[in-house]
Image (cartoon, rainbow, N blue to C red):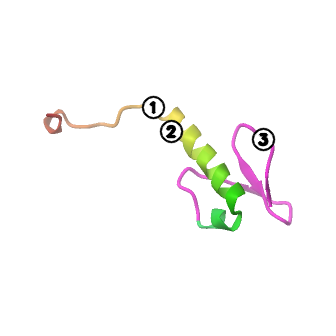
Amino acid sequence: MEPSKNNDLPKLITDDGREMEISPRGSLALLAFGAAGLDAWRQVRLQNAENNLETPNIPSDDIK
């Protein structure tokens, strides 16, 4: 199991050659990939955070 070389979205290649896409939410299957799975998940999570820099909708009543 090894991470692919694609820099856009990390994918993990399984032993049988299939690609596994990584979601920002993660999955239990990533633990099976060990450090490579966690590294790929962290990269996707970071990319997702950078792409979603919008301010959350907070009602003005809650801001003090």
Does residue 59 appear to the left or right of 17 in the view shown? Answer: left
> Quick check: marks 2 and 1 in contact, CB under 8 Å?
yes
Callout 2 secondary element: helix
Label 1 sits on residue: 53
Q: Give amino acid for label 2.
A: Ala
Q: Tell me the distance, in whole angstroms, between the alpha carbons under discs 3 and 2.
A: 19 Å
Q: Give amino acid for label 3.
A: Asn
Does residue 25 appear to the left or right of 22 in the view shown? Answer: left
Label 2 sits on residue: 49
Label 3 neighbourhood size at 10 Å, few (<14), some (14-19), many (20+)? Answer: few
Residue 38: quarter of image: bottom right
Residue 17: quarter of image: bottom right
Q: Residue at 64%, 65% (x, y): give it.
A: 31
Q: Tell me the distance, in whole angstroms, between the alpha carbons under discs 3 and 1.
A: 24 Å
Residue 52, compared with residue 41, is above or below; it is: above
The tag earlier along the polypeptide, 3 or 1, is: 3
Residue furthest toward the right?
A: 16
Q: Tell me the distance, in whole angstroms, between the alpha carbons under discs 2 and 1.
A: 7 Å
Label 1 neighbourhood size at 10 Å, few (<14), some (14-19), many (20+)? Answer: few
In front: 64, or 35?
A: 35
The magenta segment: 1-27
Q: Residue at 65%, 62% (x, y): give it.
A: 30
Callout 3 secondary element: loop
Label 3 sits on residue: 6
Residue 38, numbered circle: none
Does residue 20 appear to the left or right of 41 in the view shown? Answer: right
Q: Give amino acid for label 1.
A: Leu
